[in-house]
């Protein structure tokens, strides 16, 4: 995470759950991710991006950076806010207003970007909406 406060919160949760020493956290920019510098490895089998693309300026670079550190056969899993089209209008309006207060903007082009990046990487792509379009889930799997 780029936020020191988020890392402190995560560290406290890790300690509380008894995982200290088993999980490594690092401060970094998801749009310019350097696995070697942060974790001493070139590639990962899985990369998870959960409810963060909606808060990252230049979020498309995060998708590109995540794919770049995947090992052959690895996969990128993205879950974030959808467009809430299946929710009542009044609730969608209220939710969007609340999210804006925290600088969260659901990315209308998320599916298109993930699909385009998967094609560029010659990878498979799966996508589905969750909870009446409250959330979107995309998985890109790199060929072996």
Image: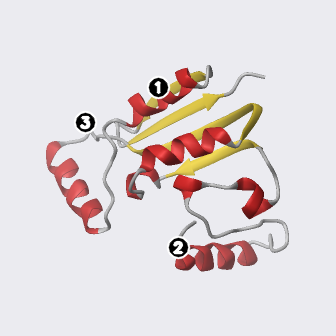
Q: Quadrant of the C terminus?
A: top right
Does dot 3 land on a helix, a strand or a loop? loop
In the displayed structure, 86 sits above or below 103; it is above
Q: CA distance from mark 2 to mark 3?
A: 31 Å
How far across and down, in percent of the image, does residue 27 sit?
A: 63, 70
In the displayed structure, 99 sits above or below 128; it is below
Asked whether, in this view, residue 107 is left or right of residue 85, the answer is: right
Asked whether, in this view, residue 99 is left or right of residue 39, the answer is: left
How far across and down, in percent of the image, does residue 105 sit?
A: 31, 53
* Total numbered labels: 3
Whether residues under marks 1 and 2 lie with C-beta atoms below 8 angstroms apart, the answer is no
Residue 3: which numbered mark, if any?
2
Quarter-wise, where is residue 29 in the image?
bottom right
Q: Is tag 2's residue or tag 3's residue first in the polypeptide sequence?
A: 2
Q: Is tag 1's residue or tag 2's residue first in the polypeptide sequence?
A: 2
- What's the residue at 77%, 56% (across, down)? 36
Q: Residues within 10 Å of mark 1 (few under 14, many from 20)?
A: few
Residue 116: which numbered mark, if any?
1
Q: CA distance from mark 1 to mark 2?
A: 29 Å
Q: Quadrant of the N terminus?
A: bottom right
- What's the residue at 68%, 76% (across, down)? 11
Q: Is tag 1's residue or tag 3's residue first in the polypeptide sequence?
A: 3
- What's the residue at 48%, 32% (across, down)? 114
From the image, tell me which residue sits under label 3.
85
Asked whether, in this view, residue 25 is left or right of residue 95, the answer is: right
Asked whether, in this view, residue 25 is left or right of residue 132, the answer is: right
- What's the residue at 34%, 37% (across, down)? 133
In the displayed structure, 117 sits above or below 2; it is above
How far across and down, in percent of the image, does residue 107 sit?
A: 34, 44
């Amino acid at each position: 995470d780029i936020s020191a406060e988020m890392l402190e919160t995560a560290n406290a949760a890790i300690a509380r759950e008894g995982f200290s020493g088993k999980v490594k956290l690092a401060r970094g920019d998801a749009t310019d991710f350097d696995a070697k510098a942060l974790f001493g490895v070139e590639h990962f089998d899985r990369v998870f991006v959960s409810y963060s693309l909606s808060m990252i300026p230049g979020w498309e670079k995060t998708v590109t950076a995540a794919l770049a550190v995947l090992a052959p056969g690895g996969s990128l899993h993205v879950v974030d806010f959808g467009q809430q089209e299946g929710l009542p209008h009044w609730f969608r309006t209220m939710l969007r207003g609340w999210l804006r207060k925290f600088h969260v903007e659901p990315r209308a082009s998320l599916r298109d970007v993930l699909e385009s990046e998967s094609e560029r990487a010659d990878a498979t792509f799966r996508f589905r909406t969750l909870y009446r379009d409250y959330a979107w889930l995309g998985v890109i799997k790199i060929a072996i």
